[in-house]
Structures are given as C-alpha cells and as structure tokens.
Amino acid sequence: MSATPELSREAFIEDLIAHNFTTYFVATHSKSASSNPAFRFTPSPVSIAVPYSWSYSDARERLMSLSSLLTTEEAERRNINFVNPSLKDFMPAAALPTLRGGIQLLLPDEQAYSHRHTANAFRLVFEAPESGAYTNVEGNRLPMSMGDLILTPNWTWHDHHNEGDSHVIWYDGLDVLMAYWIGGVFYEEMVDVTGEKYQAIKHGANAVTDNFGPGMIHRRKMFPDHIPASNNPLIYYPYSKARAALTELADQGAGDPHEGIVVEYVNPVTCGPTFPTMGTSIRLIKEQSTVEAMHKTENIIFITMEGSVTFHLPDDQKFTTELHDVTAMPSWVPYSITNSSKTPAVLFSQTDRPLFETLGFYREQKT
Ligand SMILES: [Fe+2]
C-alpha cells in the first residue's frame, strides 16, 4: 500500500471503470452508493421508475392534434405514449420498467395496417362509434366498443379498422419493454410477408367467445401454426360481461380491504394470467370506501374506467383521477385508493406480476 491509499484506491477504481470492469466497493462507497441502487443489495426493492399519473384529457388533446399532422398511411400507428419521467432518458416510451402504455386514434374510414410482434399487447377501448370499429386478430373480427378488451398475443397478426361514423380511441398496453431488455423483440409487417396490408375476415367475435361456453376449442381452426400454442386463445373480453361480474360480486358482499373487488381476465385454458408476462384485471371500489395500502412486487398501471378515485402515496403525494386517466405505480411503492364519491369507481389494471410470480420474486407486505 502506498503512502496515499485513498488516492491509490480512487485511481484503481477509475482505471477499472475505464476498462469496463467494476467492483462492489464502487456501489458501497460513500461517493456513489446513493446513486447506484442497481448495484446494491437493498433491503427491499428500489424502483428505477417513479409513480406518475397522466391526464386523459391532456393526452387526448395531443392525440387529436397529431391526427391533423399525421395520416395513418404515414404512421405505422398514430398514438401518444405515456412516459415515466425517471425513465425517459434511456427508455423513451416506458410507463414502467417493463410496461408500455399509450392511446391510439382512428378517424372514420381509417385503418391501421397489419403487423405482428413477439411482444404481447392488448387494446382497451375508450371511445368508439356505435358500430363499425374493429380489430382483426388472425382473421377474427373483434368489435371495439367502450371498455372492451382485445388481445393481440405474441406473433398474432393484427390490423385496426374504423368503418363507423365517429372516431375510435383505445389504450394500447404492451410488455415490449420487458421483451426489449431481454433481447426478445421480433416484428414484421404483413405487406412484407404476404404482399397484403390487411387480413381477410374469417370469423366474427362469437367464434372466440362461444368456443369457451361449452369448454371446447379447435385451436388450429381459429389460429394457424405460427401462433405459439401457449398463447391465450380467448382474445376478446366484452366490457359488459366484466362489469356484470363486478356488480354481481358487489351484490354478494365480496371484496378485500387491500384489493377491493377484483376480476382477473384469465386465460381459460390455464386459468393463469392474460399473458405469460402481463396480467389484466378490473376492479370495483365501492362508493365512500378505501382500498388499504400494501407493498407489492409488481409494476402496475391503473386506468380509471368509471368514477373518480384518489391514490395516496408516501410523503403526502396523491393523484386524483378522472375518466380514462392513467396512473403508474412502480414495484413496492405503497398506495391506498380512495373513492370518496357517492358512486362506485371502476379501475382497469395492467401488471407485470406474472413475471415476478414465475421467477419466484413475488412478495407483498402490509404497511
Ligand atoms: Fe401491434
């Protein structure tokens, strides 16, 4: 050891980092420890994201402005994405570390051409004409009505159409950030594969939903060989059924102080989550009630589908949401949800909890 061990130590570390090495001492050293949670074992999760809430009216206004600047022919998809302010410098379209969310618009007589990707995605319909708006998923024409959930799982061709007399706006939820981080993104445009920009329609929505009534499905009749057999075959969940289930449970007095009344959109073949990587659910919070705070290892996005709620976070931070506002909660951040109005509130949610569960990392803890 030299006469100036601190200088020697610093020179050693600088040399180490300059040559693309590091040592755990760098993370625990007083100079860098607080800014380097990715290289420390923390007693509990420290997310790289922050809690955040986006106003739907702000996003919608920008989406409408975009429609006058960009046609669907010019844009692969015309949308506005929700960006977590703490991720924007290195993940330009991430609401949370694994999850992307955005809203997309089709004006009457517009369509968005067919493509497919390994990332799983879903559409949650916010505004729609009486009829005529639909998404074609592998030949299945799935109507887009307010609150409907439409899945476009791993590698399924999908294109969007609006033959109605007013615009359609929906929320896109994707696990593409997770796919990006692990190097799993594949993408194709239909025109490059088949020469066609859009798929032919082979089935109506009842071909999807009716298959599960009798518990029978001819998977290969509905989905061709390029679709992974592990995909959720139930790609359409009408809002009316989800909402009716919540009402029925509320009438029965169901509910949990830390969850509210929740219905999950499950894969009917496995009873598992909507996608292997991403779960979706819908939750009712009764009037003048509070869902208590908990720590949970999941990144979750809430979308207010009915009513208004307030999320209360540590340090007196709070978000009050209105219809279709989008709120992101990183892993382990505790929050309570209060509905102080005189009518029930309904929240849709998109979570990466299935990832944590698969890995054995899922934990929860009461505050
Ligand atoms: Fe897509």
Image: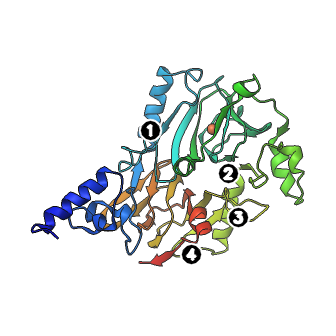
Q: In this view, does 155 lie to the left or right of 94?
A: right
Q: Earlier in the sequence, mark 2 or mark 3?
A: 2
- Mark seen at residue 256: 4
Q: Residue at x 48, y 32 (%)?
A: 63
The residue to which callout 1 is attached is 59
Instruction: Answer whether residue 242 is visible to the viewer in this image.
Output: yes
Q: Quadrant of ligand 1?
A: top right
Name the outermost residue toward the front. 2
Q: Residue at x 69, y 59 (%)?
A: 244
Q: Which SS class for mark 1?
A: helix
Q: Which of 168 and 201 is in front in this view?
A: 201
Q: Which of 38 and 144 is in front in this view?
A: 38
Q: Which SS class for mark 3?
A: loop
The residue to which callout 3 is attached is 272
Q: Is the C-beta of the residue carrying label 1 under 8 Å from the nearest atom of ligand 1?
A: no
Question: Can you tell which quarter of the image residue 129 is in?
Answer: top right
Cβ–Cβ under 8 Å for marks 1 and 2: no
Of discs 3 and 1, which sits in the foreground? Answer: 3
Quarter of the picture containing the N terminus is bottom left
Q: Position of residue 7 (x, y in %)?
A: 14, 62
Q: Earlier in the sequence, mark 2 or mark 4?
A: 2
Q: Position of residue 148 (x, y in %)?
A: 67, 47
Q: Which SS class for mark 4?
A: loop
Circle 3: residue type: Gly
- Mark seen at residue 239: 2
Q: Earlier in the sequence, mark 1 or mark 2?
A: 1
Q: How crowded is mark 2: few (under 14 residues within 10 Å), some or many (20 or more)?
A: some
